[in-house]
Image (cartoon, rainbow, N blue to C red):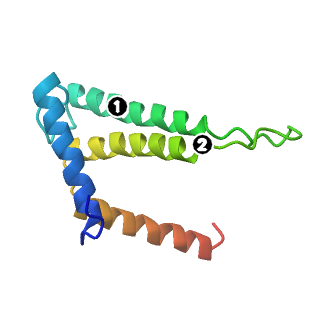
Amino acid sequence: MKLDRPDRLEEIFTLREEFMKEIAAKRGVYGEWPVDITQKKSQQLIREITLKGVEELFEALGELKNWKSHRIGGDPQFDREHFLEEMIDSFNYFTAALILIGVTPQEFFEAFLKKDDVIHRRLEEDY
């Protein structure tokens, strides 16, 4: 696997979409995209995919065993590899949801930059 590609976000979207096409062909998952997000069936699909991402986030959070402030001591063990795997699973579902509604890597990056500007302004303004 080559890691010095010039546009890694584009590559992430491409890899996710290739997988989505494979699973759509083999198991009928997803259907065709981009979906018409105004349609009930499409919203149900996006909700289902997004909730799967949330489930994977909860699996990642399960690796954090030493977070309760009221506990003395705790469990300092942390499986970083498993945490990262679950976070990637979550990211994959969220990326699939974006692809399903037709978001491109460029659109995502521009939205990211816009939000990044907002949160920095909030910090400067003591929001």
Give the camera-side residue of 40 and 94. Answer: 94
Q: Position of residue 39 (x, y in %)?
A: 19, 30
Is residue 60 at all visible to an observer of this figure? yes
* Badge 2 amino acid: Asp
Sort mark 1 into few (<14), some (14-19) or many (20+) by Cα contacts within 10 Å: few
Q: Residue at x 53, y 74 (%)?
A: 121
Pick the quarter of the image with the N terminus. Answer: bottom left
Q: Is residue 96 left or right of residue 65?
A: left
Residue that protrudes farthest toward the front in the picture = 1
Which callout, 2 or 1, points at the residue further toward the start of the chain?
1
Residue 82, percent across and down?
52, 40
Image point (27%, 55%), residue name = 12
- Judge from the rendering whether residue 88 lies leftward or rightward of residue 67; answer left or right: left
Q: On screen, 8 above or below 79?
A: below
Question: Residue 69: x and y, percent?
Answer: 82, 43
Name the residue that disc number 2 marks. 79
Q: Under tag 1, what secondary structure?
A: helix
Callout in the foreground (2, 1): 2
User: In the rendered structure, which amino acid carries the disc numbered 1?
Assistant: Arg
Mark 1 lies on residue: 47
**Residue at the farthest top position:** 27
| Measured Cα–Cα span from mark 2 to mark 1 | 29 Å
Decide if residue 33 is on the left or right side of residue 73: left
Q: Under tag 2, what secondary structure?
A: loop
Label 2–label 1 contact, CB within 8 A? no
Where does residue 73 sit, x and y in percent of width and height? 86, 41
Q: Give the image quarter of residue 125.
A: bottom right
The answer to whether any part of residue 101 appears in the image is no
Q: Dividing the image into 4 quarters, which one contains the C terminus?
A: bottom right
